[in-house]
Image (spheres, helix red, strand yellow):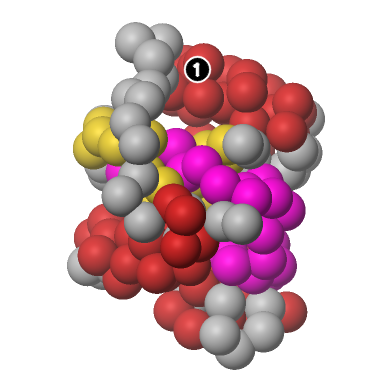
Amino acid sequence: TERTYIMIKPDGVQRGLVGKIIQRFEERGYKLIALKLVQSTPEHLEKHYADLKGKPFFPGLIKYMASGPVVAMVWQGLDAVKTGRVMLGATNPLASPVGSIRGDFCLAVGRNICHGSDSVESAEKEIALWFPEGVVQYTGALESWIFE
Ligand code: GTP
Ligand code: MG
């Protein structure tokens, strides 16, 4: 099944939202197959956000993302990329529905607490960038209760 790269940004970590964000993915039925807390570097983050190089907010984005540790995760399950983005909300938290992570926990586009891959191709690239060591394979005990 599909995998997506989800990251809790430095503000999400500092604000103590790690548990709540993980809980939403667990409760939805997604399977956690990789997880680590990392202090990233501007060089690494420039690779992660390479598509945004040249945007006026790019330097501020890199500074924000390097300002503290992030939680890097890979979640697996049905439609993980698209549904993962729905669970996060819109890029601008003010446009995010209540019930989404950004719609419930933040206000500013430059402090939007979480990241999610925007396509299956970027998910594969991001997973390779953040987890060059690979992910973990295991059988989820509840899988037959979550998938037909
Ligand atoms: P990510 O999941 O973080 O990739 O967000 P996204 O896919 O919803 O948006 P996008 O990839 O276009 O932008 C990446 C990140 O850059 C956003 O999550 C914001 O943190 C930041 N960003 C995007 N647009 C703006 C903007 O207009 N101003 C500021 N300050 N930050 C922005
Ligand atoms: Mg994006």
| In the foreground, 3 or 94 | 3
What's under tag 1, amino acid-wise?
Answer: Leu
x and y percent of residue 20 in the render? 31, 71
**Residue tagged by mark 1?**
129
In which quadrant of the rendered view does residue 61 lie?
top right
Residue drawn at x 39%, y 15% is: 134
Q: Which residues are magenta?
A: 71-92
| In the foreground, 3 or 19 | 3
Residue drawn at x 74%, y 26% is: 121
Q: How many discs appear?
A: 1
Q: Is residue 65 magenta?
A: no
Q: Residue furthest top?
A: 133
Q: Is residue 88 visible?
A: yes
**Left or right: residue 113 compared with residue 137:** right
Label 1: state its secondary structure.
helix
x and y percent of residue 8 in the render? 39, 51
Q: Is residue 61 visible?
A: no
Position of the N terminus, as image quadrant, is top right
| In the foreground, 38 or 43 | 38
**Left or right: residue 81 compared with residue 24:** right
Residue drawn at x 49%, y 83% is: 104
x and y percent of residue 109 in the render? 61, 65
Residue drawn at x 36%, y 25% is: 137
x and y percent of residue 103 in the render? 57, 81
**Left or right: residue 10 compared with residue 36:** right
- Pointer 1: residues within 10 angstroms few (<14), some, or many (20+)? some
Q: On screen, 28 above or below 6?
A: below
Position of the C terminus, as image quadrant, is bottom right
